[in-house]
Amino acid sequence: MLRNLSLRDFVIVDLLDLDVQPGFTVLTGETGAGKSILVDALSLLLGARADAPVVRNGAGKAEIAAEFDLAGLPAAREWIERNDLSDEGGCLMRRVIEDSGRSRAFINGSPVTLAQMRELGGMLIDIHGQHEHQKLAGREAQRELLDGFAGAESRLKEVAEAFRAWQELRALRVAREANEAASSKEREELGWQIGELEGLGFSVVEWDAMQSEHNRLAHAAALIATAQTSLDSLDETESSALAQVDSVAAQLARGAQIDIALKPAAEMVESASVGLREAVHLLRQYRDRLELDPQRLDNLERRIAAIFDMARKHRTEPARLPELLQQKQQRLEALGGMGSLEALRAGEQGAEARYREAAVKLSKQRAQAARKFAAAVSESMQTLAMQGGRFTVELAACEPAAYGLEQCEFMVAAHEGQPLGALSKTASGGELSRISLAIQVLASTRAGVATLIFDEVDAGIGGRVAEITGRLLAQLATRHQVFCVTHLAQVAACANRQLRVTKETHQGKVVSRTALLAGSARVEEIARMLGGITITPATLKHAEEMLRITSGEKNIASC
């Protein structure tokens, strides 16, 4: 739940540091005093769009911070752990908005995106605005409300994913059918081109080795002649170089025995003799190994010619033929491979069957929830001055969609004997506000969040209905932390705590102030809400009576 809310230079709030308690808290005050500013600040903290005007006039930036206790909120704790934002102290969300409109967001001191703020915020706070009844006129909002009551989030995700998979295959099948003639011709052409390239069995490694071998075989006769001439000069004639070097080496060796100064020269000539003998040995091996092989040379030339022909045919270099083969294989795969259109249709039918199976399960879950939801709203209507009123949920079949196989519409008969009609067309403004409140309170009982905020959702009601509304919110506060911005004394009297928001001038600027009321101060605020400008002793007495009745020995549960 929310433990602390801190604002700095936000709209007309210069400084606010509010410790928040469990239970039911109301915010009251004159119109324009800034009650809804606190709700707006929390909306921004939960990832709503920020504009420069939210920064207080004369300040460079606005700052909003809220501290939450995550006890009883395992999903939020798990999310924080998963995103490496853990802090043993709980959860601190902070947002800084500059006068330029730029903003920064933080969770437990670490910078985060607004998407992350929204994701976590949705697990912590649920805000119901004063125009909620207007949104209820839309079928999409009605369907989302029913699905939330049904707890169908995971089933909805499954249906949406199955629908996406089905539609992707359907789009591929439609495109394939529309272009079947051209696609078939292209697939056929790709098929034999791939077969031809694969049949060539070409690789870059083979190409390099083949060129080297061909070059050697093509010049084999010249290479053999070169080896033999070299051998003749070095060793295989009477005047060979090796014989002459050996003779010189022998003479120098004898001279070195007489004069030591000849020893270095003698060693160098001896070393040259050794090197020449090694060269002669290698040349003989090379000459003996190298053969004239016209058949092998002819085979290589045929292979090389085939590779060049294939490269010219596809207007590429021989070394790029493997890359070309891969490109054509990828293109064929993109066209659906060599498989038939029937195989694609079978895949689409399987995807549709999986979607419909998931959607039917969702439909059953919705139908069960619709009956329970309608009965609970109808029961609440009896206490909200609509005796005999009825509320139902109609589920009408529709074309398959990501949300399932049916549309949802709320139907209402506000009074006994009145026929059922669409909620947006049948109920009056006041009735719509009361029904909307009943729906919101009912939906909130299923909420997984700890903190619920109602921003003037009691607009358009009064008298006995206002008192019943206060009691409904107080009952809700036994399970959740509830905040309500209200102008109704009957609602405010049911709260555990009452915060008064006022507007005053400070150093020439208008600022908003928030104060916790107790004792006579709260009595006076309730009296103001009852009596307007002039507060009489009778009004004060009435206010005291309301607080005494609703508090019942300080136990709000009794109201």
Image (cartoon, rainbow, N blue to C red):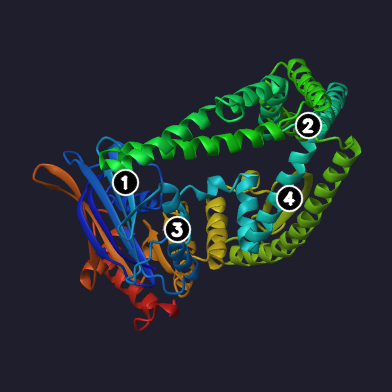
Q: Can the viewer see residue 39 in this picture?
A: yes
Residue type at numbered disc 1: Arg
Q: Which residue position is annotated with label 2?
A: 332
Q: Which residue position is annotated with label 3?
A: 120
Question: Of callouts 3 and 1, which one flags the residue occurring earlier in the amino acid sequence?
Answer: 1
Residue type at numbered disc 2: Leu
Disc 1 versus disc 4: distance between alpha carbons? 37 Å
Q: How many marks?
A: 4
Q: Nearer the viewer, residue 555 or 550?
A: 555
Q: Position of residue 449 (x, y in %)?
A: 48, 65
Quarter in which the N terminus is drawn = bottom left
Quarter in which the C terminus is drawn = bottom left
Residue at the location (32% across, 46% down)? 104
Question: Of callouts 3 and 4, which one flags the residue occurring earlier in the amino acid sequence?
Answer: 3
Question: Of callouts 3 and 2, which one flags the residue occurring earlier in the amino acid sequence?
Answer: 3
In the picture provided, is 395 more to the left or to the right than 456? right
Q: Quadrant of residue 169?
A: top right
Residue at the location (35% across, 84% down)? 553
**Tag nearer the camera, 4 or 2:** 2
Residue type at numbered disc 3: Leu
In the picture provided, is 547 more to the left or to the right than 471? left
Please determine whether, in this image, residue 478 is positioned above or below residue 32: below
Disc 3 versus disc 4: distance between alpha carbons? 26 Å
Please determine whether, in this image, residue 382 is positioned above or below residue 175: below
> Residues at badges 2 and 1 in contact (C-beta under 8 Å)?
no
Q: Dot 4: what SS? A: helix
Disc 3 versus disc 2: distance between alpha carbons? 45 Å
How would you rate the neighbour count of disc 4 (Cα within 10 Å): few for under 14, some for 14-19, many for 20 or more?
Answer: many
Q: Dot 3: what SS? A: helix
Disc 2 versus disc 1: distance between alpha carbons? 48 Å
Q: Which residue position is annotated with label 1?
A: 104
Q: Which residue position is annotated with label 4?
A: 162
